[in-house]
Amino acid sequence: MDGVPTPLRCFNEYNSAEMLVDDGVETVTSVEQKKVERSIKEVVSVYKQMHSLPQPTLLREQHYQYLKKGLRHLSDAYECLDASRPWLCFWILHSLELLEEPIPAAVASDVCQFLSRCQSPRGGFSGGPGQHAHLAPTYAAVNALCIIGTEESYNIIDRKKLLDFLLSVKQPNGSFVMHVGGEVDVRSAYCAASVATLTNILTPKLFEDTATWILSCQNWEGGLSGVPGLEAHGGYTFCGTAALVILGKEHMLDLKALLRWVVSRQMRFEGGFQGRSNKLVDGCYSFWQAGLLPLLHRALFKEGESELSRQRWMFEQQALQEYILLCCQNPGGGLVDKPGKSRDFYHTCYCLSGLSIAQHFGNMDLHHEMILGEEENRLAPTHPVYNICPEKVSKALQHFHRLPLPDDSRQPGPPAPDHLQS
């Protein structure tokens, strides 16, 4: 369908049963939850008063202007992200590609040159020029360079040294530290698997025992924790699941338990997702949680779970789009965690990524989109493993798979796995 002209779920009369019932036992959590629900109810009420035929609108031009400015100038408030500068490049570039706004060639080249200064002489990328290499900005830098998708951007990446860096942070049990001497968690395994696959440096030795370590992070809840034995968390669950998809080992997860956990994170009143049980809704989990569902959809299909994999109702796509469009858009551009919060590039990126997933989930066939509101609200699809647009993934894989593996200059790399190209 090209749009969803039906009345919005939020504009129907509110059913008090949908809102939190604390059974007379007030806690810090219940107080905060009620506060969020009241703020969302107020947003919806004001919107309803202002629009006789309410159809939420993506503030496309405002977001574009906010993002375009961020590529050239950041306020003093971003000083705290001095060690995350490749992330700022990725968040902005990916948001622009979702909005289908082209990056001027001069700007793209400037980004390439900046990221080249973030590349460590020992391999990998750091959070800023002169800093130590770290897996998180390495992931962000490689994604940003693949979004740009030019010979200049691809040539920035020193694949031999990148492989050396990944091997330097690999641990004997299969896990990875985020940087030499740093902490271990599931994010690092995902960042390593993502950049290794995109740049064709994935070797059996590099990820020996990694799948087994990730599997040990799935807990009794069904989701994955950052390290074995802790609470399941949306960001870690996405990272662990996506890493296993890259490694071709997602079938080893308890897929039904994982499905049960993630669908239970969509908030029945707000429509958005929370990151953990008993927590508040947050716009960024629009991707970290909803982005899991295409991965689960495919994994269940591969495992022969025809009934589950045929369903496109694994989450309420319309409700998530309502939450993002009504509650997460700053009128001046940029998106936010929840009403009352400040805009930033992180939430802009992951709210838009989640909106894309909600529009395209279940089938990349354009005839099976579910777009809330007018066609102008449509975003480009995003690849649920890498969170960059699928054609950029395909182009990068084709480019780097023409090159030999760094540890064997005689042979080109193996063909890219089919499930990573679409």
Image (cartoon, helix red, strand yellow):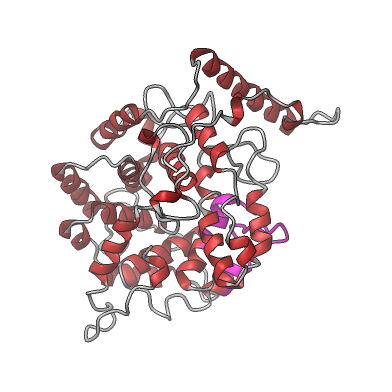
Query: Residue drawn 81% across and 31% down?
Result: 22
- Vertically, is 93 above or below 374? below
Locate residue 87, reporting x and y percent: 36, 46
Q: Is residue 194 magenta?
A: no
Q: For this view, does 337 lie left or right of residue 87?
A: right
- Where the C terminus falls, by quadrant? bottom left
Quadrant showing the N terminus: top left
Left or right of 62 in this view: 104: left
Q: Residue furthest right?
A: 24
Q: Nearer the viewer, residue 355 or 104?
A: 355
Is residue 303 visible in this depiction of the protein?
yes
Residue at horizontal 56%, vertical 29%? 8
Determine the main secondary structure of the stretch shown in magenta.
loop
Furthest residue to the top? 49
Q: Nearer the viewer, residue 97 or 171?
A: 97
Q: Is residue 183 visible?
A: no
Residue at image position (42%, 65%) is 192
| Quarter of the image where one finds residue 259 | bottom right
Please report the residue visible at 43 percent of the width from the left and 29 percent of the height from the top: 343
Q: Provide residue 312's location: percent of width, then percent of height.
A: 56, 53
159 left or right, relative to 291 = left
Q: Is residue 220 magenta?
A: yes
**Foreground residue among 277 and 183:** 277
Q: Give the magenta part as a residue range.
A: 212-241
Where's residue 59, x and y in %? 38, 28
How many tags in the picture?
0
Q: Is residue 29 above or below residue 159?
A: above
**Residue 266, percent across and down?**
63, 43
